[in-house]
Image (cartoon, rainbow, N blue to C red):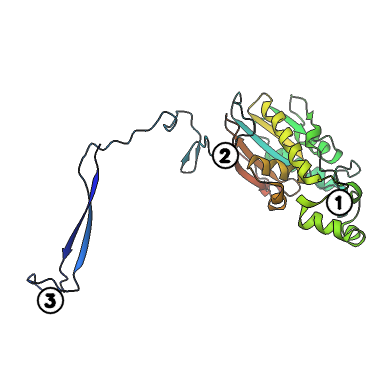
Amino acid sequence: MGFAVLVTTTLPFTSASTIERPRSVPHSAKTRVEIRCLSSNFDVSLSNDEKLENNASMTGGAYDFKGATTSLTYELLSSSKKITLVRHGLSSWNDESRIQGSSNLSILTDTGVQQAEKCRKALADISFDQCFSSPISRAKSTAEVMWQGREEPLVYMDSLKEAHLFFLEGMKNVDARRIYPNEYTTWREDPARFTVNGIYPIRNLWLTAKEAWREILSAPGENILVVTHKSILRALICTALGLAPERFRSVDINNGGISVIVFNKQGEAMLRSLNMTAHMYNDHVYHY
């Protein structure tokens, strides 16, 4: 195996007017540093795992991402997966600034239906194998609009339901802040510590999200659409990236916002896109 050595050479300083090399080396001498390789046969061999496979995915300047993140499945998937996550359109309680949680009383507004239609058109060129949706009305209605014209039936999953927020559900934010100042402040500023009778809704949501991922990733197909709610979407994205419940509010998703996560066969996630909303403002169609 070859090796390199460091060679230093002290050279005298010469001005533009100096022609001859001075016999003594002044204090202003410069030092030149060279690195010489003593062998032209220096060989760096890669293990089989390090070599680029023909079908390795490229992401910018990087090749593949095997072993770069934590697996959600701890077992090989049948294939890599591309998961498109969509938040439901504007609901009646969104419009009224009410806390929704898992309540089924908040329904999709006319604006929400239009947003769902915009999502459908924006994803019209994507060949999805199947669609999973929360069974709660506002998400279910969004999924029905988006999935119309597709052959496969919609699949409703309880693990995609929104977080249960107990007595806060249905309350306007201003009223909840006034009537339950301590609980509301904790919910807004430190949701991972928000608790009702010993139950931590957001911590429980992390467990629910992991369950949802197991169901989604074990399903057949490589290109899957998921339509659900803001809080569970936050949990899905954070659990995929290995983020704790304390990071709950570090991710935000608009009504009709689209995010894309890719999983390799080892069940490791890579976030490709977060909260895309260009389609809400023009006729943008996504290709990925």
Position of 104 compared to 224: left or right?
Answer: right
Q: CA distance from mark 1 to mark 2?
A: 34 Å
Residue at label 1?
A: 99
Residue annotated with mark 3: 17
> Which is nearer the eye, 227 or 40?
40
Q: Secondary structure at mark 3?
A: loop
Q: Nearer the viewer, mark 2 or mark 3?
A: 2
Q: Is residue 260 visible?
A: yes
Front residue of this view, candidates 2 and 17: 2
Please state which of the two labelled residues, at mark 1 or mark 2, is closer to the viewer. Answer: 2
Taking the image as shown, residue 168 lies to the left or right of residue 153, namely: right
Label 3 and label 1: CA atoms lie apart by 81 Å
Residue 176, horizontal then vertical, whole percent: 89, 57
Q: Which residue is mark 2?
A: 69
User: How many residues crowd around disc 2 within 10 Å: few (fewer than 14), some, or many (20 or more)?
Assistant: some
**Quarter of the image that includes the C terminus:** top right
